[in-house]
Amino acid sequence: MGCTLSSPNVNPDLAVSEEKVSPSLEDVLDLTSDLQCRVDEELQESFVLSEAQKELIRTSWEILHKDIARVGVIVFIRLFETHPECKDAFFLFRNIDDFQQLKMSKELQAHGLRVMSFIEKSVGRLDQTDKLEHLAFELGRSHCRYQAPPKYYEYLGTQFIQVVQPILKEEWTPEVEKAWESLFKYLAATMRRGFDAEEKTSAGQSLHSGKAGVESTLNRV
Ligand code: HEM
């Protein structure tokens, strides 16, 4: 189908022919898809990090990466404290209410480390936006299989920013905060597109196979 509204030779105002008094279902679906593409493009455009911002992220990551195991755990503990519904997405954590026990959990430590390694990969790809986009898009796809919905993704960025602030001490400035915020917004938006794409694929497949809905991947944690 593609994004016809953004194609160079198509006038968006004429996307639906004036001769058709009532548009067919196909026209409506095309138009909906085009609007979604336009929204997606706007979300994609949110990755407008200046060279200075990229440098701020790289420099602060150099300090932070020594602490990633600890940062990863605290970010998730705070995420679960502020948004307990996120804990339900994790098979192994959903029944643990004692945060002290959770903090000591080897599985949570391993998970925090996996997520921080993803952030490290992203920081390493700030100049390769196509690779970064692919990475985040595929992660969104896998989150659809984990049944972890997009509305929560940005919360992780908020918690990350709060956790790393005291570690960076005087290196933390409003500019550093804005740079990290932009990166997390971009990651969350791209993951959302991956999630939506996976959801559509799964819906199509289940229509053909007669099975209902998105089938979740069994979470390791
Ligand atoms: C910017 C936001 C987030 C990032 C970058 C992120 C990153 C990751 C990464 C790197 C993994 C490891 C597995 C893989 O690569 O597929 C993972 C797994 C997972 N994430 Fe996230 N995540 C984010 C937000 C969330 C949120 C908010 C939730 C819960 C609502 C969540 C739920 C899960 C679950 C359930 C798994 C599977 C755990 C497992 O079985 O190992 N994620 N995530």
Image (tube, rainbow, N blue to C red):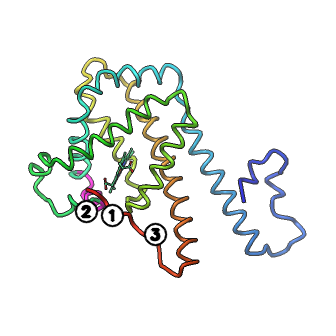
Q: Residue at x 54, y 41 (%)?
A: 133
User: What kind of residue is marked 3?
Assistant: Val
Cα–Cα gap, marks 2 and 3:
17 Å
Mark sitting earlier along the chain (1/2): 2
| Label 3: few (<14), some (14–19) or many (≥20) C-alpha neighbours in 10 Å | some
User: What kind of residue is marked 1?
Assistant: Leu
Ligand 1 contact, mark 2 (Cβ < 8 Å) = yes
Q: Quadrant of the C terminus?
A: bottom left
Per the image, label 2 sits on a secondary structure element best described as loop
Ligand 1 contact, mark 1 (Cβ < 8 Å) = yes
Q: How many marks?
A: 3
Q: Which residue is mark 1?
A: 218
Q: Nearer the viewer, residue 109 or 189?
A: 109
Q: Quadrant of residue 18?
A: bottom right
Q: Which residue is mark 2?
A: 91
Q: Residue at x 54, y 71 (%)?
A: 203
Residue range in magenta is 82-89
Cα–Cα gap, marks 3 and 1:
12 Å
Per the image, label 3 sits on a secondary structure element best described as loop
Residue 174: % across, % down: 37, 25
| Residue 123 versus residue 152 in the image, above or below | above
Q: What numbered label is drawn on residue 214? A: 3
Q: Within the magenta stretch, is there residue 85?
A: yes
Circle nearer the viewer, 1 or 2: 1
Q: Quadrant of the N terminus?
A: bottom right
Q: Within the magenta stretch, is there residue 188?
A: no
- Say if mark 1 contacts mark 2, CB within 8 Å: yes
Mark sitting earlier along the chain (2/3): 2
Cα–Cα gap, marks 1 and 2:
8 Å
- Say if mark 2 contacts mark 3, CB within 8 Å: no
